[in-house]
Image (spheres, rainbow, N blue to C red):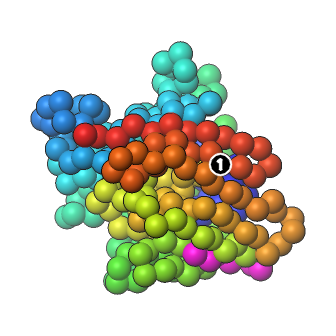
């Protein structure tokens, strides 16, 4: 499990329809991709991860015809739906995320809204979790290439700053002196073919897929070395397919977790 989280995450319970009104008609229709992708998505693009299997979850991913996330399902190995996330776009930008979680024997929901102002993105999350109402704001600073530079969290302890390499990989982060340095391979990142800015990949991967795969944008993270000895360094090992994308991942820190990845063809 990743020790320093990129984004503050709360599991909430609320009725999404009470949170906001959104233009659901901008979600593309479900399936015109034929047998190209195997994920019943409207895309015809290869090398998009459509199924990720670990010891705890089976994650199924669908894309629109612009190769952006439109739906992420998390299931257990018996097929029980644990979490469903829907992604809504407006004017070519991510506008909302609606998440329903069923993992705690009751329906838990979160509604997220993204508002844009030059190089700043305001992320509002609202809902009710375990009987507690919340509505909080995070502020993200990005550069012209969409790389994440800074997160202003809901408390000073959740603030983050980042350095990126020329490929868009996060190579350093600082959380009030808790610092991490990251190294990468030169192969295709698991989510390289997803057509979203780097900052939104970071947000979505960490919150809705897995923190173990949170840094695999353009390339694939090999290690996270922490300055603080309060954290155990992380190591990542890969097996690659013929297209040089990871098809198996082993993440090691305090314990190990393995992932098997299936791509569109």
Q: Where is residue 220 in the image (x, y as percent from the top left)?
A: 50, 60
**Rendered residue at 68%/65% (across/down):** 224
Secondary structure category for the residue under label 1: strand
Hey, which quadrant is residue 103 in on the image? top right
Q: Which of 35 and 9 is in front in this view?
A: 35
In the rendered image, the quadrant that contains the C terminus is top left
Count of labels in the image: 1
Label 1 sits on residue: 251
Residue drawn 28% across the image and 60% down it = 195
Foreground residue among 184 and 114: 184
Question: Is 172 in the magenta?
Answer: yes
Q: Can residue 256 be seen in this view?
A: yes
What residue range appears in magenta? 171-177
Q: Is residue 148 above or below residue 209?
A: below
Residue 22 shows in the view:
no
The answer to which of 88 and 261 lies nearer the viewer is: 261
In terms of secondary structure, what is the magenta stretch mainly? strand
Could you tell me residue 104's position as x and y percent? 64, 28
């Amino acid at each position: 499990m990743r020790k320093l989280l990129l984004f503050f995450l709360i599991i909430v319970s609320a009725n999404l329809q009470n949170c906001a009104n959104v233009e659901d008609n901008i979600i593309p229709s479900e399936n015109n991709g034929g047998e190209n992708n195997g994920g019943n998505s409207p895309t015809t693009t290869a090398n998009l991860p459509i199924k990720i299997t670990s010891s705890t979850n089976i994650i199924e991913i669908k894309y629109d015809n612009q190769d952006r996330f439109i739906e992420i399902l998390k299931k257990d190995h018996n097929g029980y739906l644990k979490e469903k996330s829907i992604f809504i776009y407006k004017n070519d930008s991510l506008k909302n995320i609606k998440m329903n979680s069923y993992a705690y024997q009751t329906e838990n929901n979160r509604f997220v809204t993204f508002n844009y102002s030059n190089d700043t993105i305001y992320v509002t999350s609202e809902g009710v979790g375990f009987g507690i109402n919340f509505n909080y704001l995070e502020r993200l600073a990005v550069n012209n290439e969409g790389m994440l530079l800074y997160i202003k969290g809901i408390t000073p302890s959740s603030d983050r700053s980042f350095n990126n390499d020329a490929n868009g990989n996060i190579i350093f982060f600082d959380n009030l002196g808790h610092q991490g340095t990251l190294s990468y391979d030169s192969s295709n990142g698991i989510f390289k073919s997803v057509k979203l800015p780097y900052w939104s990949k970071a947000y979505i991967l960490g919150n809705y897929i897995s923190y173990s795969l949170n840094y695999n944008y353009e390339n694939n993270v090999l290690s996270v070395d922490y300055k603080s000895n309060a954290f155990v360094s992380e190591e990542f090992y890969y097996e690659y397919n013929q297209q040089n994308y990871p098809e198996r991942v082993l993440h090691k820190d305090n314990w190990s977790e393995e992932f098997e990845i299936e791509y569109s063809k």
